[in-house]
Image (cartoon, rainbow, N blue to C red):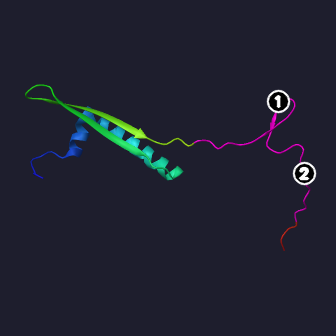
């Protein structure tokens, strides 16, 4: 690469007075936290539309997408009562009384 060419990272820092760089950093942090917390894969995409404005200028139009999978809640079964309440434990199942013996 030629030493006279500006690095891509320098351009990113200049777009929208650094707001693009800030947003990318924020979304990358969010993706890393989600990936580590839930053991899922996330995807961060930067898309730059590049179009000429005239013979002397180029316009860059950035867009960022972050794909973070949503965890689906697990189903749980309840026991309905006659008055519309929901119970976790089967009301027809008798409870067993256990004595806890301390360890010696």
Q: Is 32 situated left or right of 2 in this image? A: right
Residue nearest the viewer, comparing 78 with 64: 78
Residue 17, horizontal then vertical, whole percent: 26, 33
At 25% across and 40% down in the image, what residue appears? Answer: 12
Residue 14, horizontal then vertical, whole percent: 23, 37
Residue 6, horizontal then vertical, whole percent: 15, 45
Q: Which residues are magenta?
A: 72-100
Residue nearest the viewer, comparing 102 with 1: 1
- Which residue is label 2 attached to? 95
Q: Residues within 10 Å of mark 2 (few under 14, many from 20)?
A: few
Residue 31, horizontal then vertical, whole percent: 44, 45
Write down the quadrant of residue 10 in the picture.
top left
- Which residue is label 1 attached to? 84
At mark 2, the secondary structure is: loop
Given the current orientation, which residue lies at the most extreme top position?
Answer: 54
Residue nearest the viewer, comparing 65 with 74: 74
The tag earlier along the polypeptide, 2 or 1, is: 1
17 vs 33: above or below: above
**What is the quadrant of the C terminus in the image?**
bottom right
Q: Residues within 10 Å of mark 1 (few under 14, many from 20)?
A: few
Q: CA distance from mark 2 to mark 1?
A: 22 Å
Total tally of numbered discs in the picture = 2
């Amino acid at each position: 690469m030629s030493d006279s060419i500006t690095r891509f990272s320098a351009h990113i820092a200049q777009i929208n007075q650094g707001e693009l760089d800030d947003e990318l950093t924020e979304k990358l942090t969010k993706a890393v936290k989600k990936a580590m917390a839930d053991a899922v894969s996330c995807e961060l995409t930067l898309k730059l539309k590049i179009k000429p404005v005239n013979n002397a200028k180029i316009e860059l139009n950035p867009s960022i997408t972050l794909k973070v999978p949503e965890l689906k809640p697990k189903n749980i079964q309840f026991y309905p009562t006659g008055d519309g309440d929901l119970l976790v434990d089967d009301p027809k199942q008798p409870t067993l009384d256990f004595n806890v013996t301390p360890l010696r």
